[in-house]
Image (spheres, rainbow, N blue to C red):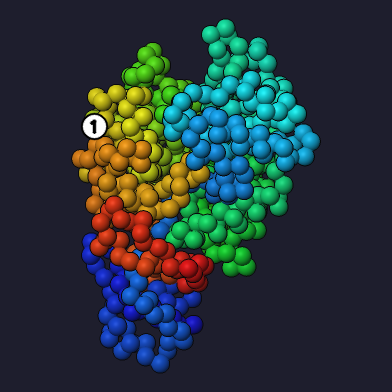
Amino acid sequence: MAELWYGGTIYTMEQEGEQVEAVVTKNGRIQMAGSLEEVMAVWKGAIDQEHHLQGQVMYPGFVDSHLHIIGHGERLLRLDLSFMTSPEEVKEALSSHASQLPHGQWLIGEGWNENQWADPRIIHKSELDEISTEHPIMLTRVCRHALLANSKAMELAGVTEDTEDPQGGKIVRDEHGLTTGYFLDAAQDPIKDAMPEYTQSYLEKAISVSIEDLTRNGIVGGHSEDLNYYGGFRKTYDAFLNSIGPKHTKFRAHLLVHHEVLDDMLADGLTYKSGTEFVELGAVKIFSDGAIGGRTALLSESYEDDKGNRGMAIHEEKQLAQIVKKARKHDLPVAVHAIGDEAVAMITRILNGVPDAPHRDRIIHAQFMRDELYDQVSSTNAIVDIQPTFVSSDFPWVLDRIGEHRLQNAYPWKKLLQSGIPCAGGSDAPIEEINPLLAIQAAVTRKSIHDQKAYGIEQCLTMFEAISLYTKGSAYTIHEEGKRGLIKEGYDADFTIFDRDLFALHPDRLLEANVTRTVVDGTVVYQR
């Protein structure tokens, strides 16, 4: 069935400002794009359905290049702590929630962030014990590189005062050497492993709730990392297959495969791009360091507010290299979480020492660089996944961590692009909000949501560069630049339609725009 889209502004995103008047789609693909007169000359009498845009503005479908689809769904389903402004508010919410839970059920909270509290302290396990010793309590920090647990959760996890720190993790202790209930990076694993098994129905519900919210925000696809945390590779992969597709909701889910479940994927005879039209497998995901909030991102110099601490390597370099080599043995690309400059340097050394994969590698975040690293990264086949909203949420408190002298290479989005390093844009939801307009605004203005000041304005992107992160950038990342990311003949009929022109709006007013329709494979999956 041929369908005509016309009557508004249609940006192809091939070149800045390039527009067409009309687009014809059929069987999920763009058949023609051009002037209305040209299109009608070819397709007159063959159009089965017309979509008049009513003056609205159409773009190639926005794709979030880095998020956690199930995690975002969980945030929507669970107790959300992300907007709370004090430890007292968190504890009050926990007490209220605990009173509604069945006996012994886990109390799980998502997204606390002490940096947005007037009193930026870490809640102690004794405070959680005051709320409940009957319910195990587990509270995930916004970065997901740290959690809080009460004594009951620690007991179920087998964590005692004698438990040693694992490689790539830390059990935080007080001045007397006693545990505080604060766990960083790999030290979180025993607590998470002690939690009840996730049911298939729960995972499918979390995915469905997440996809509904993503499409409402104009997002047609997402590159997600979920396959190692919810009961195993096959169970989680099946949950995606059962939740996304023509019989459910069309959405383009590209799933990174954590290195700890790589063998499970291979045992099932699967590889890169295996799957369906709407659910496919991606690169091998590896963590090389932690996060800046918990001071576990690996830096080349000490943290400004914690002298002697340079962060934490999740894997020693030799071990990290072995994981990359294992992926290469199977011709697989890798997607490496690297926030600190030393983590970026480490993975860059490794990538430059192994053969390229047939598909592009990814360095995820690269929030802190140093001058010589740009050329080193550009010498690899890697793209960089950036999350522009980190700028708006991390400043000004991040300056306490890194100091003013590192600002010139902090969140250096413009420098990455100017160095010829391809970039894609994402949210890292549920760590940040999924709304792509927040990310585009942050990339263009670099304003903090806390004090409305701009930080590192020399790194501001143009509106075209920022929108390209979510369109051409995300497509290029997974070798789909020949069929996605543009409005062009032969490309997938994936569109994001707004009620106003993002290029015409002042960046400070970007959030006034509303998604009116989200289209995947020629199907309207959301309509306002």
Hey, which residue is sitting farthest top in the picture? Answer: 176
Estimate the x, y position of residue 419 in percent, counting from the top left.
Answer: 23, 41
- Relative side of 229 to 255, left or right: right
Give the camera-side residue of 450 and 335: 450
Estimate the x, y position of residue 174 in percent, counting from the top left.
Answer: 55, 12
Does residue 419 sit above or below 65 in this rendering?
above
- Relative side of 151 to 304, left or right: right
Does residue 7 sit above or below 153 in this rendering?
below
- Using the rendered view, name the quadrant where residue 375 is placed: top left
Mark 1 packing: few (<14 Cα in 10 Å), some, or many (20+)?
some
Give the camera-side residue of 48 and 348: 48
Hey, which residue is sitting farthest bottom in the picture? Answer: 45
Estimate the x, y position of residue 246 in percent, counting from the top left.
Answer: 59, 68
Q: How many marks?
A: 1
Estimate the x, y position of residue 440 in percent, counting from the top left.
Answer: 33, 51
Q: Residue at x 62, y 23 (%)?
A: 127
Q: Residue at x 64, y 20 (%)?
A: 126
Does residue 124 sit above or below 276 in this rendering?
above
Residue under label 1 = 408
Q: Residue at x 64, y 15 (%)?
A: 163
Q: Residue at x 42, y 64 (%)?
A: 515
- Relative side of 122 to 59, left or right: right
Q: Is residue 434 visible?
A: yes
Secondary structure at numbered mark 1 = helix
Indicate the amino acid at tag 1. Gln
Q: Is residue 262 visible?
A: no
Hey, which residue is sitting farthest left in the picture? Answer: 458
Give the camera-side residue of 174 and 484: 174
- Using the rendered view, name the quadrant where residue 267 is placed: top right
Does residue 24 sit above or below 97 in this rendering?
below
